[in-house]
């Protein structure tokens, strides 16, 4: 088989390759069809704009009557559309919900909520009473891959990226946990959620607990796993200082991630692939000023909790050496009405190390308190 070029003239990128006509096939015809695919739920204004842009190019002087130029021109258009689509995804209007249905569930992408000059990345999956999932210091919205499919069958699951994590990019000087509460309020308003349940891992408690304290009308119940929380006490200060030193060392690369941040030894031996994934998720995040989590302005004093009424569940893994296996029991003693639960086979991230049991315990608590 000899190669040949379509068209009346040789291709400028392969001038040594003869045309079909030169090769003795004057009646050979080559027909090409082009199509463009977009994400499901692509907004109609964007579809209309793409259609108009492509039609204008195809009717322009560079293509009209010159079919040999059509492929190169369309390639340039497609590259521009990819850039446009990426830009549009980053700047979806607040009223865009992008609903699409899969396996009987509504999956919604609503990439960013705006709080002043900062954009907070968030996703929404499923329908029903809302749950907001807030990750820890080694996580981001990807952390909840074991929870979203489980809860999205009955709940609307909103995963949030704290500022400075993954897609919630910010200059480091704008990072401080004092912004977490207004960031969460921005997400709720953006999503059209009046009240919700919160499920927070570790650092996520700096968002969930002060929000429940200051805005109890927005929080049905609060679940916190593997967190010293910002509740101040002499015992908690010791644990906070220890965890901060470890976290900073991990961020500098001085300590191994999974082993130092509380993944159990058994899990690392039995699940090396998932251990790798846990560390890879953490590497997607930007730099942050970890020491700010100890600033006095974000700490909650026990006296501040005197009127606290939000149903709260504090959980921890028996093998959490990032904190201590019993520290959640101390925090539960400081929070009025709080319940506690210990995962016998987990380390710090029980949502990751023991997901089925984590989901079962959280679901039972939500069934009693989510509206």
Image (spheres, rainbow, N blue to C red):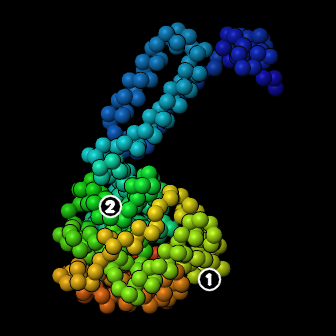
Tell me if 359 is positioned left or right of 63 in this view: left
Q: Between residue 217 and residue 76, name the one nearer to us.
A: 217
Q: CA distance from mark 2 to mark 1?
A: 35 Å
Is the residue marked by circle 1 packed among few (<14), some (14-19), or many (20+) residues within 10 Å?
some
Q: Between residue 43 and residue 334, name the one nearer to us.
A: 334
Question: On the image, which quarter does residue 6 sit in?
Answer: top right
SS at mark 1? helix
Which percent across, then down, holds residue 189?
Answer: 24, 56
Q: How many marks?
A: 2
Q: Label 1 belongs to which residue?
A: 265
Q: Between residue 129 and residue 110, name the one nearer to us.
A: 110
Residue 198 can be seen in this image:
no
The quarter in which the C terminus is drawn is bottom left
Q: Label 2 belongs to which residue?
A: 179
Which percent across, then down, holds residue 96?
Answer: 30, 45
* Vertical placement of residue 120 versus 197, above or below: above
The quarter in which the N terminus is drawn is top right
Q: Residue at x 17, y 82 (%)?
A: 307
The outermost residue toward the front is 296
Residue 117 can be seen in this image:
yes
Q: Residue at x 62, y 83 (%)?
A: 265
Which percent across, then down, holds residue 131?
Answer: 31, 68
The outermost residue toward the right is 1
* Vertical placement of residue 204 versus 32, above or below: below
């Amino acid at each position: 088989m000899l190669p040949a070029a379509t068209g009346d003239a040789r291709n400028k990128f392969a001038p040594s390759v003869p045309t079909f006509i030169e090769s003795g096939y004057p009646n050979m015809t080559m027909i090409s069809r082009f199509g463009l695919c977009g994400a499901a739920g692509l907004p109609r204004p964007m579809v209309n704009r793409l259609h108009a842009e492509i039609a204008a190019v195809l009717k322009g002087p560079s293509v009209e009557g010159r079919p040999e130029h059509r492929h190169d021109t369309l390639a340039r258009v497609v590259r521009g559309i990819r850039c446009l689509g990426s830009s549009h995804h980053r700047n979806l209007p607040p009223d865009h919900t992008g609903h699409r249905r899969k396996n009987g569930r509504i999956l919604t992408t609503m990439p960013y909520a705006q709080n002043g000059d900062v954009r907070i990345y968030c996703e929404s999956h499923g329908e029903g009473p809302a749950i907001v999932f807030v990750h820890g210091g080694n996580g981001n919205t990807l952390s909840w891959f074991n929870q979203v499919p489980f809860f999205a069958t009955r709940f609307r699951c909103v995963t949030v990226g704290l500022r400075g994590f993954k897609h919630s990019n910010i200059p480091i000087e704008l990072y401080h946990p004092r912004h977490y509460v207004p960031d969460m309020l921005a997400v709720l308003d953006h999503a059209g959620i009046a009240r919700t349940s919160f499920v927070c891992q570790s650092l996520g408690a700096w968002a969930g607990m002060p929000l429940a304290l200051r805005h109890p009308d927005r929080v049905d119940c609060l679940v916190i796993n593997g967190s010293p929380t910002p509740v101040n006490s002499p015992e908690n200060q010791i644990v906070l200082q220890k965890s901060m030193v470890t976290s900073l060392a991990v961020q500098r690369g001085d300590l191994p991630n999974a082993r130092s941040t509380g993944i159990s030894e058994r899990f690392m031996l039995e699940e090396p692939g998932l251990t790798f994934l846990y560390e890879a998720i953490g590497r997607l995040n930007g730099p942050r000023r970890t020491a700010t989590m100890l600033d006095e302005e974000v700490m909650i004093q026990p006296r501040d909790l005197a009127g606290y009424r939000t149903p709260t569940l504090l959980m921890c893994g028996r093998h959490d050496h990032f904190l201590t296996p019993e520290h959640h029991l101390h925090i539960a003693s400081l929070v009025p009405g709080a319940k506690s639960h210990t995962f016998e086979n987990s380390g710090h991230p029980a949502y990751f190390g023991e997901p089925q049991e984590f989901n079962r315990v959280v679901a039972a608590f939500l069934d009693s308190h989510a509206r």
